[in-house]
Image: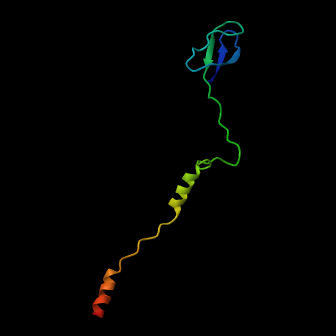
Amino acid sequence: MPTYDYECTACGHHFEAFHSMSADPLTHCPECNGKVQRLLGTGAGLLFKGSGFYQTDYRSSGYKKDAAADKTPKPEPKKDKKSASNKDTKKAQ
């Protein structure tokens, strides 16, 4: 559930309220019972601390094996030497 900031228009009291998104906004100040206005906020910042976070840090071992298999070069198919072997067989006859 999000935290909402409110400010009283009568006394200027600033406070926070913790309620669900579907709940109606507060209308009265807890200090003077005056009218309150919900303030627009930017929300909480997201902080990453440490050496770094990467997309592949928490992948399964099966995914890692498949990714490693994709990186290995595949051998090229051998070319047919039928034309060269046909010439050799014709000479031998």
Name the residue located 57 percent from the left edge and 16 percent from the top edge: 23
Name which residue lies at 52% across and 60% down: 69
Write the residue at 70% across / 13% down. 12
Q: On the rendered image, what quadrant is the N terminus found in? A: top right
78 or 3: which is nearer to us?
78
Residue 88 position (above or below residue 9): below
Quadrant where the C terminus sits is: bottom left
Rendered location of residue 53, percent (x, y): 64, 46
Q: Which residue sits furthest bottom?
A: 92
Which residue is painted at 62% across and 14% down in the image?
37
**Which of these two is toward me, 28 or 81?**
81
Question: Which of the pair 30/2 is nearer the observer?
Answer: 2
**Depth check: 20 or 5 in front?**
20
**Looking at this rendering, what residue extends furthest in the front direction?**
93
- Residue 68 image offset from top left, x and y in percent: 55, 59
Is residue 32 shown left or right of residue 42? right
Which residue is most to the top? 33
The percent coordinates of residue 5 (x first, y second) are 65, 20
Residue 80 located left or right of residue 51: left
The image shows a total of numbered marks equal to 0
Colouring rule applied to residues: rainbow
At which x and y percent is residue 77?
Answer: 41, 71
| Location of residue 36 by image quarter | top right
Q: Quadrant of residue 78?
A: bottom left
